[in-house]
Image (spheres, rainbow, N blue to C red):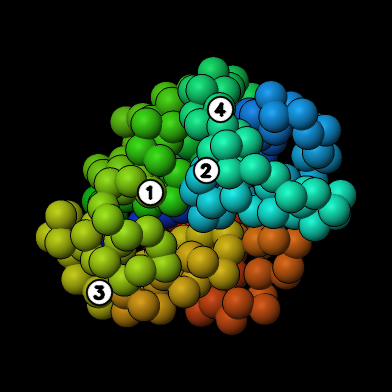
Amino acid sequence: MSKAPRYALLTIDLDGTLVDTAAEIAEAANRSIEEVGLPRQPVPMITRLIGAGARELMKRLLNRIEVERGLSLSHADRESALRQFDVHYQATAGTACRPYPGVADALVRLRGAGVRLACVTNKEARYSEQVLAACGLSQSFDLLVGGDTLVVKKPDARVIGHAIATLAATRETTAHLGDSHVDVEAARNAGVAAWVVPYGYNGGEPIASARPDMIFADLGEVALHLLD
């Protein structure tokens, strides 16, 4: 008889961990700033701002443009750009995303072995649903916790705590997998194992600097670790 996996619940970040969404996020952001007369920005620069949700990304982007170009945007222009991002990302979410190699297979293996899976992201739930559906991953998770599901976001301990409570797990049998220092902090705050992958969006910094418990090459390696 095979023994049960050491970890009963794996919570997983979305952007930069499961799915590459940088191109479609950057396109929505660029369409939004163009509408208030600002020039399009390079995709790699916008990619470095991903991780805290759409509104925070746009705030950081506008602040950066103001500093670099010596501008002072009006409150009306800032609010307009923020509103327009919602419109444009509704149109681009799911159009250019792609799962990282081996993700779909690893999720099937984990679920087949009885590991509960929760997608825990700071991306708003409606966008997360669009991305998961476009990538064929909607049925891969027992729970989705978006950036607007609760009144708090990662790295607040209550986010992963919500997944643990909802799926009847414990901190000792839960691990969180992400791609950024926000994910490591979220895992630490929630008292669960902090695992990461080395690709994704961590503001251009090496993920090792966040001092995670373990670094895995990809989700397939996570599955091997959990199941073997």
Q: Which residue is mark 2?
A: 54
Q: Is residue 160 above or below residue 99?
A: below
Q: Is residue 47 above or below residue 178?
A: above
Comparing labels 1 and 3, the label whose residue is closer to the camera: 1
Mark 3: few/some/many CA within 10 Å (<14, 14-19, 20+)? some
Q: Earlier in the sequence, mark 3 or mark 4?
A: 4
Q: Nearer the viewer, residue 102 or 157?
A: 157
Q: Residue at x 51, y 31 (%)?
A: 83
Comparing labels 3 and 4, the label whose residue is closer to the camera: 4
Q: Are marks 1 and 2 in contact (CB under 8 Å)?
A: yes
Label 1 and label 4: CA atoms lie apart by 19 Å
Residue 11 figure quarter: bottom left
Q: Earlier in the sequence, mark 3 or mark 2?
A: 2
Image mark for residue 147: 1
Q: Quadrant of the N terminus?
A: bottom left
Of helix, strand and loop, which one carries label 2?
helix
Q: Residue 137 at what x, y percent from top left? A: 42, 31
Image mark for residue 84: 4
Mark 2: few/some/many CA within 10 Å (<14, 14-19, 20+)? many
Q: Say left or right for 213 vs 137.
A: right
**Amino acid under label 3?**
Arg
